[in-house]
C-alpha cells in the first residue's frame, strides 16, 4: 500500500488484473457494438440525405449536425425515460443492462457517422455524378459505389464515433447504473474509484482509455496518409 | 406510343440521332438555340467552335445527361421500353476522366456490372478491354494514381468494354501531353474501325482535320454548319467558321 498509485496502476495493467480486464472488455464490447449499429444505420442514411432532395431535407441535415453535439447526459436521460419501468419500452426490461448502454451510445455515435457520411458522399457525388449517370447508374445504385469509394474518409468518421462512445460517461452511467461486473465500464469506473480513493484502478483504467484514444487518432492519421498516397 | 410487339430492341440500332429545335436555357441565358442536327449511322463527327459556343453542352444533351429546355432529341429507337437500351448503347469520355478509387480492372468491372453484364463475364471482358488499350499490365494499379494519359486510356477502355453503338468524347485530349494525345486518337480510330459512331469535341484544329468525317460548327449557342470535313476546312459556309479557321475567333 506504500507503493505510489501510478506504479500500482501500471502493475494492474501489466498483470492483466481481472477487475481491470473485465471493465475494459465490457467497455469495448459496448462501444464497438454501438459503433457497429450506428455505422450500419448511419452510413446509408447519410448517403440518402446526400443524394436525394426532398421537403425537410435541410431540417434533417441541420438536426443531424446539431445532434453531433448532443450532451451524453441528455441522451442518457432520454433513453432512461424510454426504458424505465413506466416508459414506453419499459416492459422490455432493458434498463441497467449492457444492451441499454449500447442503445444510448448508438444514439450518440449515429449523428456523427451519418453527418460525416452525408458530407463526404455529397462531395463525391458532385465529382462522380455525370460519369455514373453516363454508365447508367441511378441514385440508389450509386449508394454502394459511393460508400465504397469513400471508405477511407468514412472509416475516420467511424473511429471518431468510437472515440466519442468510449470516452463518454454520463449516458452509460444513467442507463447502465454502473453495476459492478454487469454495467461498469471504464469511464464510470474511473469516476467511482476516484471518489472511493482507489486511485490505482482509476489510474490504470485512465491509462488504458488514453492509450485507446491515442491508438484511434494514430489510426485516423495513418489511414488518411495511406489513402492520399495509394489511392489519390 | 411504341407497341410492345416492337422487340427485340437490343438488335435494333439507336441511330440516327435527331435533334429538332433543341434549346437549352439556364436562368435567363440561352446557351443553345434551335439546334437541328442529324447524327447518321456511321462516321466520326467533330464538333468545333470557340470556347463557350456550347459544344460540351450539346454533347451532354445528346448523351442524355441533361434535358433540353425545349425541342426534341430522338433516337431511332423510341418508346418507353427503349430507354434502358438507349442508355446502355452509348458511352461518354470526359475531358477529365472520372475514375473510381479502385483498381483499373475494378473500374471496368464496375461499369459492366452497372450495365447488367453477368458476373462471370465481367473480368474477362474487362481484361480484354484493358489489353486492347495496352493497360493489362496495370490492371491491378489503383486508377487514381495512374498518369493522366493512362487514366484517359482507362476511361476509353471502360467505354470499350461497354460495346457502345455511339461514343461521345468531350475534349478528351485537352489535358494531355502529345504522346497521350496520339494514344487517344488511335483509340478513337479503334472504336471507329469496330463500327462505333464517334461524336467528339476538340479545340485542336489539327486533331479535327485528322479525325473528322464531318464537322458540326457551333458559335454562340447556334449551329452554323454541319458539312463534310473536307468542305468545312476548304470552304466554310459561314463568316464565323472562316474566322475560326483563320484563328481569329478562338477562345
Image: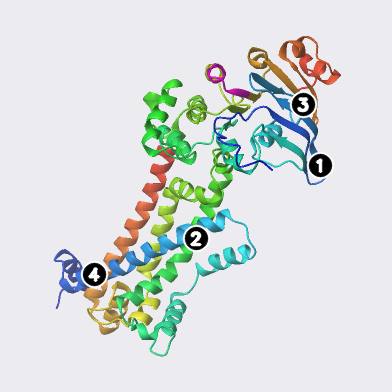
Up the image or down, A52 lies above or below B19; here it is: below
Q: Are marks 2 and 4 on the same chain?
A: yes
Name the spot of residue B19 as percent of width and height, x first. 74, 32
Marks 1 & 4 on one chain:
no
Q: Chain of mark 4?
A: A
Spatial CA distance of label 1 from label 4 is 69 Å
- Regarding mark 2 in the picture, which secondary structure is present there? helix
| Alpha carbons under labels 1 and 2: distance apart | 37 Å
Alpha-carbon neighbours of circle 1 within 10 Å: few (<14), some, or many (≥20)? Answer: few
Q: Chain of mark 2?
A: A
> In the depicted view, which residue is nearer to us: B155 or B190?
B190
Q: Is residue A173 magenta?
A: no
Structural distance between the alpha carbons of marks 4 and 3: 74 Å
Q: Which residue is mark 4?
A: A204
For label 3, the residue is: B218
Callout count: 4
* Label 1 secondary element: strand
Which of the two discs, 2 and 4, labels the residue nearer the N terminus? 2
What residue is rendered at 33% in x and 84% in y? A93
Give, as a single range, the part of the protein colored magenta: B188-198
Residue B78 drawn at (x, y percent): 66, 37
Image quadrant for the N terminus of chain A? Answer: bottom left
Front residue (pair B178, B217): B217
Residue A45 image label: 2
Which subunit holds the residue at mark 3? B
Amino acid at each position: 500500500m506504500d507503493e505510489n498509485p501510478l506504479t500500482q496502476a501500471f502493475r494492474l495493467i501489466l498483470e492483466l488484473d481481472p477487475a481491470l480486464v473485465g471493465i475494459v472488455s465490457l467497455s469495448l464490447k459496448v462501444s464497438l457494438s454501438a459503433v457497429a449499429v450506428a455505422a450500419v444505420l448511419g452510413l446509408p442514411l447519410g448517403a440518402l440525405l446526400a443524394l436525394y432532395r426532398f421537403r425537410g431535407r435541410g431540417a434533417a441535415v441541420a438536426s443531424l449536425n446539431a445532434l453531433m453535439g448532443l450532451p451524453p447526459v441528455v441522451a442518457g436521460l432520454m433513453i432512461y425515460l424510454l426504458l424505465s419501468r413506466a416508459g414506453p419500452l419499459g416492459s422490455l426490461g432493458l434498463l441497467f443492462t449492457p444492451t441499454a448502454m449500447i442503445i444510448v451510445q448508438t444514439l450518440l455515435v449515429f449523428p456523427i457517422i451519418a453527418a460525416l457520411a452525408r458530407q463526404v458522399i455529397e462531395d463525391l457525388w458532385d465529382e462522380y455524378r455525370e460519369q455514373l449517370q453516363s454508365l447508367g447508374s441511378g441514385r440508389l445504385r450509386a449508394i454502394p459505389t459511393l460508400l465504397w469509394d469513400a471508405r477511407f474518409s468514412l472509416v475516420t468518421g467511424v473511429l471518431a464515433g468510437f472515440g466519442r462512445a468510449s470516452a463518454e460517461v454520463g449516458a452509460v452511467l444513467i442507463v447502465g447504473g454502473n453495476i459492478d461486473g454487469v454495467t461498469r465500464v471504464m469511464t464510470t469506473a474511473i469516476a467511482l474509484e476516484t471518489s472511493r480513493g482507489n486511485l490505482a484502478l482509476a489510474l490504470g483504467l485512465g491509462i488504458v482509455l488514453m492509450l485507446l484514444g491515442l491508438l484511434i487518432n494514430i489510426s485516423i492519421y495513418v489511414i488518411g496518409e495511406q489513402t492520399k498516397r495509394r489511392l489519390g | 406510343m411504341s407497341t410492345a410487339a416492337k422487340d427485340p430492341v437490343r438488335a435494333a440500332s439507336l441511330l440516327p440521332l435527331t435533334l429538332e429545335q433543341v434549346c437549352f436555357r439556364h436562368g435567363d441565358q440561352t446557351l443553345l438555340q434551335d439546334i437541328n442536327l442529324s447524327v447518321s449511322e456511321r462516321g466520326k463527327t467533330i464538333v468545333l467552335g470557340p470556347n463557350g459556343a456550347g459544344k460540351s453542352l450539346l454533347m451532354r444533351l445528346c448523351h442524355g445527361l441533361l434535358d433540353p429546355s425545349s425541342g426534341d432529341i430522338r433516337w431511332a429507337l423510341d418508346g418507353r421500353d427503349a430507354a434502358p437500351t438507349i442508355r446502355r448503347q452509348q458511352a461518354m469520355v470526359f475531358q477529365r476522366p472520372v475514375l473510381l478509387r479502385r483498381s483499373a480492372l475494378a473500374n471496368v468491372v464496375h461499369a459492366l456490372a452497372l450495365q447488367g453484364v453477368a458476373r462471370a463475364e465481367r473480368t474477362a471482358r474487362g481484361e480484354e478491354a484493358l489489353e486492347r488499350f495496352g493497360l493489362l499490365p496495370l490492371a491491378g494499379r489503383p486508377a487514381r494514381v495512374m498518369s493522366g494519359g493512362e487514366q484517359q486510356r482507362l476511361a476509353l477502355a471502360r467505354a470499350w468494354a461497354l460495346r457502345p453503338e455511339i461514343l461521345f468524347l468531350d475534349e478528351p485530349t485537352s489535358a494531355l501531353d502529345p504522346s497521350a494525345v496520339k494514344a487517344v486518337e488511335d483509340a478513337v480510330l479503334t472504336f471507329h474501325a469496330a463500327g462505333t459512331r464517334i461524336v467528339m469535341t476538340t479545340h485542336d484544329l489539327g486533331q479535327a482535320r485528322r479525325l473528322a468525317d464531318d464537322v458540326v460548327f457551333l458559335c454562340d449557342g447556334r449551329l452554323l454548319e454541319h458539312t463534310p470535313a473536307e468542305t468545312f476546312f476548304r470552304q466554310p459556309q459561314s463568316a464565323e467558321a472562316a474566322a475560326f479557321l483563320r484563328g481569329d475567333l478562338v477562345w
